[in-house]
Amino acid sequence: MTTSSPTTTTIAKAHGRFIRGSVSKVRRVLDQIRGRTYRDALIMLEFMPYRSTGPITKVLRSAVANAEHNLGLDPASLVIAQASADMGPSMKRYRPRAQGRAFAIKKQTCHISIAVAAQTDS
């Protein structure tokens, strides 16, 4: 019985924490860029009409800078291996309403994680 060792790929990660915006709206954008090359993802993010593309672009550039500086990888050969968004804490605010009532307003935050890896030619 032969066992093959898993191929080790070099992965660089970056995290953006406590980003203002709902998780579902951020995931909508991350689903579009997951698996794409760095260059294609930047072009897509630039022309998407969503507010969450700003923080996502910032985290993506940070992940690529980590790959370039720490691992010596070429940015042209990078592909987005993982992209996820998780819920962060909600900031609770209150809105005054009629007859002395107060309605709660939850301002949601999220944590964005992006990992880039060198593109394999297979």
Image (tube, rainbow, N blue to C red):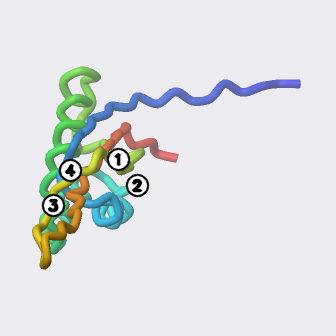
The residue lying at 16 percent from left, 56 percent from top is 93
* Residue type, numbered disc 2: Gly
Is there a contact, CB below 8 Å, between mark 3 and mark 2? no
Q: Percent position (x, y) of residue 39?
A: 22, 54
Which residue in the structure is indicated by mark 3?
Answer: 94
> Which residue lies under the disc numbered 1?
79
**Direction from residue 13 to residue 4 in the image, left or right:** right
Q: Is mark 1 on a helix, strand or loop?
A: strand
Q: How crowded is mark 1: few (under 14 residues within 10 Å), some or many (20 or more)?
A: many
**Residue corresponding to mark 4:** 91
Secondary structure category for the residue under label 3: strand
Extreme residue in the top direction: 70
Q: Residue at x 13, y 78 (%)?
A: 98
Q: Is residue 78 visible?
A: yes
Which of discs 4 and 2 lies nearer the camera? The answer is 4
Q: Say the numbered circle drawn on residue 89.
A: none
- Which of the 4 image quarters holds residue 60? top left
